[in-house]
Image: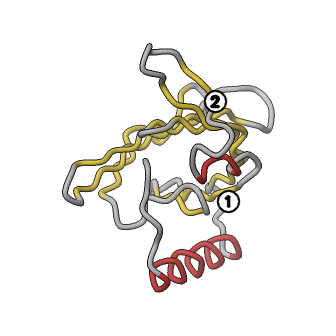
């Protein structure tokens, strides 16, 4: 999930797409908020990323949009624009929404995103697994 800084043009395009999607968000889209970022330690335990490790240290509270029908995710810390995106499960009141995204830029990278739509209440927990693990909640 580690990304190299975007070029100015790509950053502007991503920002424009995010702003357009925010203003034209479909009723089925998800609005998600990151509450934490973790990584797997060399010993195999899950540890929060914190304190000058990388730019994810400021991710808590950041928001992103998921176009549920296409699986596209757009936001400051989360984006799969330009990746091969597949919705594995569209989700429902009984099961989770699942997306996998892959790309090859010298090496194969992948992201797995799951939102537990079956959870009661307005906030639906999510996990995004890549080089790091982002977690939080989404609202429909």
Residue toward you, 129 or 7: 7
SS at mark 1?
loop
Residue named by callout 2? 48
Q: Position of residue 49 (x, y in %)?
A: 61, 35
Residue named by callout 1? 27
Give the vertical position of 91 relative to 45 (above or below): below
Give the vertical position of 20 relative to 101 (above or below): below
Position of residue 41 in the picture relative to residue 15 (left or right):
left
Identify the coloring: secondary structure
SS at mark 2?
strand
Position of residue 118 in the picture relative to residue 122 (left or right):
left
Residue at x-position 68% and y-position 70%: 22
Q: Residue furthest right?
A: 121
Give the vertical position of 93 relative to 17 (above or below): above
| In front: label 1 or label 2 | 2
Displayed quadrant of residue 95: top right
Position of residue 40 in the picture relative to residue 120 (left or right):
left
Residue at x-position 24% and y-position 60%: 105
Q: Residue furthest left?
A: 106
Q: Position of residue 87 (x, y in %)?
A: 39, 46
């Amino acid at each position: 999930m580690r990304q190299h800084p975007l070029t100015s043009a790509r950053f502007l395009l991503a920002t424009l797409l995010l702003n357009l999607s925010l203003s034209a968000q479909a009723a089925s889209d998800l609005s998600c908020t990151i509450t934490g970022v973790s990584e797997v330690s060399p010993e195999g335990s899950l540890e929060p990323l914190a304190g000058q490790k990388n730019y994810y240290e400021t991710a808590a509270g950041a928001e992103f949009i998921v176009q549920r029908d296409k699986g596209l995710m757009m936001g400051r810390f989360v984006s799969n624009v330009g990746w091969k995106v597949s919705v594995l499960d569209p989700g429902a009141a009984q099961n989770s929404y699942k997306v996998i995204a892959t790309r090859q830029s010298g090496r194969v990278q992948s992201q797995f995103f799951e939102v537990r739509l079956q959870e009661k209440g307005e906030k639906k927990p999510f996990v995004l697994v890549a080089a790091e693990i982002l977690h939080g909640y989404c609202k429909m």
